[in-house]
Image: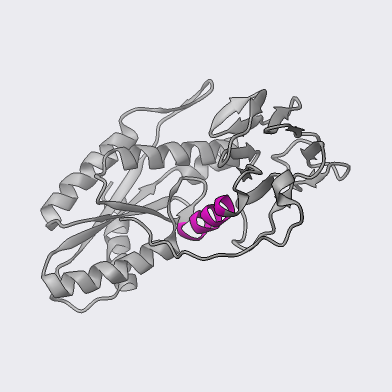
Amino acid sequence: MQANRVTCHFELAIPDLKRFGLLVRIYPSPILASPIPLELPTINIGRDHANHIVISDDSVSRCHAVIMREEDGHTIQDTVSTNGTYVNDEKVDKAKLRAGDRIRLGNHIFCYLHPQDIESQYVETMFQAMTTDALTRTYNKRFLLDSLDQEIAASVHTGQTFCLMIIEMNNLGTIINQYGPIIGDAFLTEFARRVKAQLSVSDLIARFDENRFCVVYRPSHLEQAIAMSERVRNATCKRDFVWGELELAITASVGVSKFDGRNPMDAKQLVQEALLILEESKRNG
């Protein structure tokens, strides 16, 4: 399922946009967070208040990275930070930035907007912020519930059955407590990637909460969805997760509910049914 876009025209209330790029914080961040203009030739980023961009988070080093303006855009350079600087999930010492690049500093993710055609990049970034989870690049809970309402209406009209799977990464809390949120985020992202690899383009996956994802599987019967959920569970748990020299086993549980258009049920009730089945699955091992 693709999210619907609404075309609109507007101008960003920031002067001289053609001369500067922007950083937009996409995780963790409210949707209406102000973009950060890259006005200066050199911009220091870190936890220390002497930086141009201050990130008050222990996962960010006091002097974490520097962004340097060039004739055709910007370059980012890590300043020997503790947790590293990542561009599009790749650890870098120095990298040329391109439009739409995701920059990760500690627990924070920014999107880089190139000075050229910056308004359209900003619209796309805000659209993604409203519909997707920036960390795992799956849809978000708001988009999921809206989509479930549409699926329920279509099922009532056509009589086709669809199923909802909820997949939980069971030991995420333990990993975060033992190794920290950066490792936890990395493993959760890999968990989501493995789930997505088992799905077809018509299936919808969304992050439901901290360690759970929902998959709308359609059209399908309950037996098909249960078989799919087992394939997903095996794919996420069969191989250990690796981060540098750290290698950990992951466990997962799945709950599946169905909607066949006959029993009156709204999106929240359908989710609640899948959650109850998930909890039963966890109790039964």
Above or below 171: residue 4: below
How many numbered marks does the figure carry?
0
Above or below 54: residue 14: below
Image: magenta residue range: 120-131
Tell which of 271 and 78 is nearer to you: 78
Residue 109 visible here: no
Instruction: Name the residue at the right extreme.
Output: 50
Quarter of the image for residue 88 reads: top right
Residue 222 visible here: yes
Q: Position of residue 50 (x, y in %)?
A: 88, 42
Q: Position of residue 90 (x, y in %)?
A: 55, 28
Report the predominant secondary structure element of the magenta stretch.
Answer: helix
Q: Is residue 213 magenta?
A: no
Identity of the residue drawn at 18% across and 50% down: 226
Left/right of residue 20 with respect to residue 156 in the rendered view: right
What's the colour scheme?
one colour
Identity of the residue drawn at 28% across and 46% down: 285
Q: Position of residue 202 (x, y in %)?
A: 24, 51
Q: Position of residue 25 (x, y in %)?
A: 64, 50
The N terminus lies in quadrant: bottom left
Left/right of residue 116 with respect to residue 129 in the rendered view: right
Identity of the residue drawn at 26% across and 39% down: 198
Left/right of residue 235 with respect to residue 212 in the rendered view: left
Identity of the residue drawn at 64% across and 26% down: 95
Left/right of residue 89 with respect to residue 225 in the rendered view: right
Quarter of the image for residue 265 reads: bottom left
Instruction: Name the residue at the top extreme.
Output: 245
